[in-house]
Amino acid sequence: MIKDFSLNPLVNAQIQVNSEQSIEFTVLVDCALDYKMTATSTVLITVEGRKQGDTDWVDLQTDEIDLSDYDGTTQAFEIRVTADTITTHSFEQFTLRVSKWTKL
């Protein structure tokens, strides 16, 4: 589950990112064995994440963050949303997801 810092579940939210700019925010994630964090979005935005304190960002649309190492804990994760060049006013959507995955 993804939560804000008041421990309220985040079901949806609205943010504004201008053309060629980024916005960063932090969420709390309930971590469990065999769970991962991923994102889906339009081609006009990139969604990245990292555990708070880490230096490297993970593109959550093409890769994932394995939450297994933090099993049974709630951890802070930083999320960065970056807009591509946008020439007209538009509404773009992304989904940030924590879900179970199956090891092959």
Image (cartoon, rainbow, N blue to C red):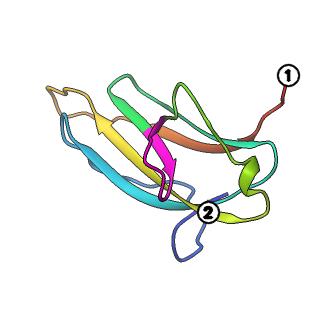
Q: Residues within 10 Å of mark 1 (few under 14, many from 20)?
A: few
Quadrant of the snapshot with the N terminus: bottom right
Mark number displayed over residue 15? none
Residue 49 appears at what percent x and percent y?
48, 44
**Type of amino acid under label 1:** Leu
**Type of amino acid under label 2:** Gln
Task: Name above or below for residue 26 compared with residue 42.
Answer: below
Q: SS at mark 1?
A: loop
Q: Which residue is mark 2?
A: 75
Task: Name above or below for residue 16 compared with residue 65.
Answer: below
Residue 57 lies within the magenta run: yes
Residue 41 appears at what percent x and percent y?
46, 31
Q: Which residue is mark 1?
A: 104
Residue 57 appears at what percent x and percent y?
44, 40
Task: Name above or below for residue 60 compared with residue 22.
Answer: above
Residue 32 lies within the magenta run: no
Name the residue located 52 percent from the left edge and 40 percent from the top edge: 95
Q: SS at mark 2?
A: strand
Q: Nearer the viewer, residue 59 or 12?
A: 59
Q: Is 43 situated left or right of 16 in this image?
A: right
Quadrant of the snapshot with the C terminus: top right
Name the residue located 82 percent from the left edge and 49 percent from the top edge: 33
Extent of the magenta region: 48-58
Q: Residue furthest bottom?
A: 6
Name the residue located 78 percent from the left edge and 53 percent from the top edge: 32
Q: Is 49 situated left or right of 33 in this image?
A: left
Q: Mark 2 vs mark 1: which is more N-terminal?
A: 2
Label 2 and label 1: CA atoms lie apart by 26 Å
Callout 2–callout 1 Cβ contact below 8 Å: no
Name the residue located 72 percent from the left edge and 57 percent from the top edge: 70
